[in-house]
Image (cartoon, grey):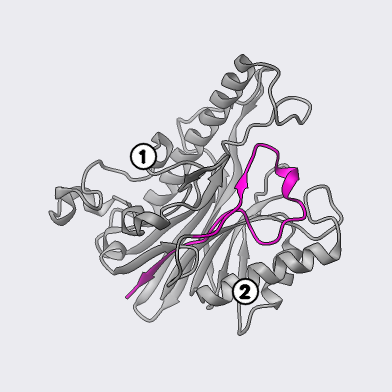
Amino acid sequence: MLLGTWNLENLYRPGGPSGPPDKASYDTKLASLAAVITELDPVLLGVQEVGDPAALDDLTGLLGGDWHIALSTHPDVRGIRVGFLSRTPPRIVADTNAFPAHLRPVQSDDAGTEEPTAGRGFLAVEVATETGPLTVAVAHLKSKLLTYPGNRFFPHDEGERARYGAYALYRRAAEAATLRSLADDLLAGDGRTRDVAVLGDLNDEVQAATTQILLGPPGSEIGTPGYDHPDQGDATRLWDVAPLIPADQRYSRINSGRRELIDHILASHHLIRRVTAAGTGLPGEQAPQLPSVGPDPAERREAPGSDHAPVWVRVE
């Protein structure tokens, strides 16, 4: 079976401030997204940036066969949220944006505004597979794209850029800690026997501190000597599949000309041992062909498809 994650990039119906400007652009975007999902043929696909639930219905209507939708009830201020497309009916086991106990609100601007919750909710579902239940959480952490007062995408000076970069990092770190708390609940200390995955747009790369928060006990990463030596940490660890992705495909977005892997799939001990392949884009193809994006998202309102490549794993 194939399990994947994909940021659909501003999936809104046309006419609003963030969606395509007209129906023709919208139809082109949907057709492009549907072609990729059809080729992927996932059992379960975590999705991000669903701005309009009706738009996801429109997209699903272009896919062959039966599909089921689960969406978080915790969108951000722009209305975008995470969700799943599933071949079998998903059972929602968690939908939350609440910080865990002891984690305090974080500063988000120069005025001292504090954010007491994650910007977007985390959704976890359980689906039935031929090998037993699979539990998966989908997330979309705070972006590295910075927005300044007055809805600006460019700072007045480098001091402002640095401060707002720090505010974004505070929030992304708090959200990573919140997602790790949810992963602890899903693993229930039994990752050696449970098939659990955490996936989504983490908005940072493999070695970033925020991504590392999600792994749990240190050591045993894929490619290290500890990977093949079981220890007590295996019950609560998550493994990032990134090292299993061919090196020339190890990116899911191109930011100002730089390739970066910011979309991730992390798997429990029981699940990672059953992964037979991992990749970005479409299975069997070369490195993803992606546009290079800049700091102003409005520049892509008429663009087809997504500025992200899907990330996927195949599980035996």
Residue 38: percent from left, percent from top: 57, 77
For residue 160, say whether it is visible: yes
**Left or right of 74 on screen, residue 218:** left
Q: Position of residue 170 (x, y in %)?
A: 52, 28
Residue at (34%, 68%) from the top-left corner? 277
Which of labels 2 and 1 is toward the front?
2
Q: Dot 1 corresponds to which residue?
A: 207
Q: Which residues are magenta?
A: 288-316
The residue under label 2 is: 35
Residue 307 inside the magenta-drawn segment: yes
Helix, strand or loop status at disc 2: helix
Quick check: 302 left or right of 100?
Answer: right
N-terminal-most mark, 2 or 1: 2
On screen, 53 above or below 80? below
Going by the numbered disc 2, the residue's amino acid type is Ala
Q: How many marks?
A: 2
In percent of width and height, residue 219 lies at 21, 43
